Image (tube, rainbow, N blue to C red):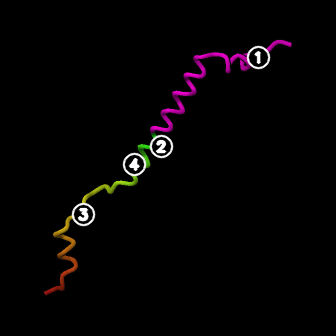
């Protein structure tokens, strides 16, 4: 019984490199996405926040 083209994939270095590249790009994208969610988008204007807390005149 002859093997199919799929039986040669694990032995082929090109496929291993291709799949490893896709995995590495996915991991980098995930890390970047998580880091961007962790940091605030804008800085808080402390003077504006203090004015909101002070009693109205």
Task: Decide which of tag 3 and tag 2 comes sooner along the chain.
Answer: 2
Tell me if label 3 and label 2 are in contact, CB under 8 Å.
no
Instruction: Give the structural element (helix, strand or loop) at label 4.
Output: helix
Q: Which residue is mark 2?
A: 30
Closest to the camera, between mark 3 and mark 4, is 4
Q: Residue at x 51, y 27 (%)?
A: 21
Task: Decide which of tag 2 and tag 1 comes sooner along the chain.
Answer: 1
Q: Residues within 10 Å of mark 2 (few under 14, many from 20)?
A: few
Task: Decide which of tag 4 and tag 1 comes sooner along the chain.
Answer: 1
Instruction: Give the structural element (helix, strand or loop) at label 2.
Output: helix
Q: Residue at x 55, y 22 (%)?
A: 17
Tell me the tag on residue 35: 4
Instruction: Give the structural element (helix, strand or loop) at label 1.
Output: loop
Q: For the C terminus, which image quadrant?
A: bottom left
Q: Residue at x 18, y 85 (%)?
A: 55
The answer to whether residue 5 is left or right of residue 12 is: right
Q: Looking at the image, which residue sits at the far top?
A: 2
Q: Which residue is mark 1?
A: 4
For the magenta stretch, what is the residue range?
Answer: 1-28
Tell me if label 4 and label 1 are in contact, CB under 8 Å.
no
Q: Which residue is mark 3?
A: 44
């Amino acid at each position: 019984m002859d093997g199919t083209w799929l039986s040669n994939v694990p032995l082929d270095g090109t496929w291993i490199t291709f799949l490893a590249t896709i995995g590495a790009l996915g991991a980098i994208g995930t890390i970047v996405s998580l880091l961007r969610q962790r940091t605030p988008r804008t800085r808080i204007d402390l003077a504006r926040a203090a004015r909101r807390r002070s009693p109205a005149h």
